[in-house]
Amino acid sequence: MSREESPLDQAIKRLDRAIAQLDQRLAARGAAASAQGPFDQDRARLAAELDQARAREKALEAAGAEASAALGRAIAEIQGALSQDDAQEG
């Protein structure tokens, strides 16, 4: 006796097929991702190194600006002291 499938049985079969296809695609994607893994790791490492280099550059720029300002103040003090000496001698 052949039994006709109910709509629920048909829906369950479609769902099973869709899940199987999804599993296959995820497995294929997982294999592709693991093949790209070392490249992604290198890219992440290089990006982190670039961020560190940029941070060092900013720190050096700040230190250079601070040193330049301190040097400017020192020059101004020396010039002021020399001009006072010249005024006292004259």
Image: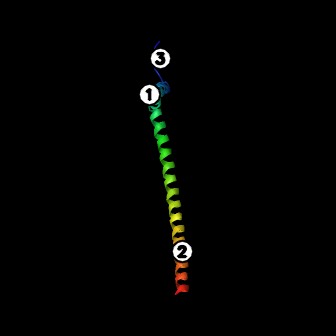
> In terms of depth relative to the viewer, which is nearer, 53 or 83?
83
Q: Is residue 59 above or below residue 36?
A: below
Can you name the residue that lies furthest to the top here?
1
Q: Nearer the viewer, mark 3 or mark 2?
A: 2
- The residue that label 3 is drawn on is 3
Q: Which residue is mark 1?
A: 28
Residue located farthest toward the bottom when viewing the structure as drawn: 90
In percent of width and height, residue 52 lies at 51, 48
Image location of residue 32, percent across then percent down: 43, 30
- Which amino acid lies under the numbered mark 2 shown in the image of this protein? Ile
Mark 3 vs 1: CB contact within 8 A: no
Give the image location of residue 56, x and y in percent: 51, 52
Which residue is the site of mark 2? 78
- The earlier-in-sequence mark between 3 and 2 is 3
- In what element is the residue under mark 2? helix
Look at discs 3 and 1 and give the one toward the viewer.
1
**x and y, in percent, of residue 69 in the image:** 52, 68
- The front one of 39 and 5 is 39
